[in-house]
Each structure stands twice: as C-alpha cells, then as structure tokens.
Amino acid sequence: MGVAAMRRPGVKVRQLTLNEDFDEYGRLIQMLGTNEQSMPGMYGRKYSDPTTETPRAGAVEVWQIANLTGDTHPIHFHLVNCQVLSRQPFDVESYNGTPTYTGSARGPEPTEIGWKETVKMHPGEVTTVIMKFDLAKVPFSVPASPRTGGNEFVWHFHILEHEEHDMMRPLVVT
Ligand SMILES: [Cu+2]
C-alpha cells in the first residue's frame, strides 16, 4: 500500500482531529474527533459519544489526523496495523475542518517504515496513515457489542492519563 492506494477509487479518506479542552473541573482534557464540530468551535468528542469511525470489514481507509493540540501524541489503532504515508504542517489557528497547509508533506521517518500499531502525531501537523480493516478469523462467533451493535474496537492515545481522560474513541467495523 502507499500513496497510489490513497488515490484509488473506493478508498475512503477520513478527516480526524486531536483536541485539547478543559473538563467541568477545569482540568486539561484531550479528545479525539472528526473535522465536524461537536459543539461550536470544538471538534473533540467523548468516548461515550456516538461512533463516527465505522469502516466496512475488508475496507482500505486513509485517515488524515490533524493535531490541534500543543503536544505529540502516540495514537494506537486496535485491530489494524497501519503505514504512515506522510506528515504535513498546517495552520492550527485557522483550522475550520479543512487544514490550510503551510509546508510540504514528508514521508515517514527511517525508523518507522513498515507496519505500525502506534504512530507519533506531532502538534501542528496532519499525520496521514493507511490501513485495511480485516476482522480476525476465529473458530467461534463473536457477539456484537451491546453498546454499538458492531465489531467494536478503539483508537486512542496510548498513555493512560490521556486515554482515560478522554482521548479514546470507538472504532466499529461494520
Ligand atoms: Cu491500545
């Protein structure tokens, strides 16, 4: 897989975000989101909010994840391994759901060529990854998630403090 696959008809491209806000106690809270506002001026969504990432089983998808926060976040995808296609700087201040790029894209670092479970996403950059959502073949039937009704996994920040508060979203393969 690579950049050519990204342009192939049928490869869904999702625009996603890493977000920072304050919770009701004034504590810093980190959230994942899409490029559609969840509330005026906010893109972050809670883990318990309705699922937005629902790839079809067997589908190849490209996720372009804009980091709107001030930190680098290691983002882990359950079920799939991915490949890093690129990282590209954008203007965080003017982000309105579509990034305005401020420089050219660069490929993965030499140490991260190949399959990745967790990918570093730097502040002020859109990190683009590609992955194929094959369900595991198991010799038994797996019941649907009682919460989402699908094959529910997660994608999340891989440091516990942020993962639990609340940088984790369901990933439901349909
Ligand atoms: Cu994980």
Image (cartoon, helix red, strand yellow):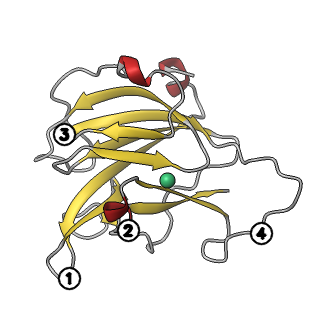
Query: Could you tell which of marks 1 and 2 lies nearer the N-terminus?
Result: 1
- Marks 1 and 2: which is nearer the front? 2
Residue type of the residue flagged with mark 1: Glu
- Above or below, 94 against 19 in this view is above
On the image, the x and y values in percent for residue 93 come to 10, 47
Neighbor class of circle 4 (other Cα within 10 Å; few <14, some 14-19, many 20+) is few
Q: Which residue is mark 3?
A: 124
Query: Could you tell which of marks 2 and 3 lies nearer the N-terminus?
Result: 3
Q: Which residue is mark 1?
A: 24
User: Cα distance, mark 1 to mark 2?
Assistant: 15 Å
User: Cα distance, mark 3 to mark 4?
Assistant: 40 Å
Residue type of the residue flagged with mark 4: Pro
The quarter of the picture where the C terminus appears is bottom right
- Marks 2 and 3: which is nearer the front? 2
- Disc 3 is placed on an element classified as loop
On the image, the x and y values in percent for residue 15 come to 38, 45
Q: Which residue is mark 4?
A: 143
User: Residue 21 vs residue 55: left or right?
Assistant: left
Residue shown at the point (21%, 60%) measured from the top left: 20
Residue shown at the point (39%, 21%) measured from the top left: 111
Nearer to us in this view, 115 or 127: 115
- Marks 2 and 4: which is nearer the front? 2
User: Cα distance, mark 2 to mark 4?
Assistant: 25 Å
Using the rendered view, name the quadrant where residue 14 is placed: top left
Q: Which residue is mark 2?
A: 164
Neighbor class of circle 3 (other Cα within 10 Å; few <14, some 14-19, many 20+) is many
Query: Could you tell which of marks 1 and 4 lies nearer the N-terminus?
Result: 1
Which residue is at the far bottom? Answer: 25
- Disc 4 is placed on an element classified as loop
User: Cα distance, mark 1 to mark 4?
Assistant: 36 Å
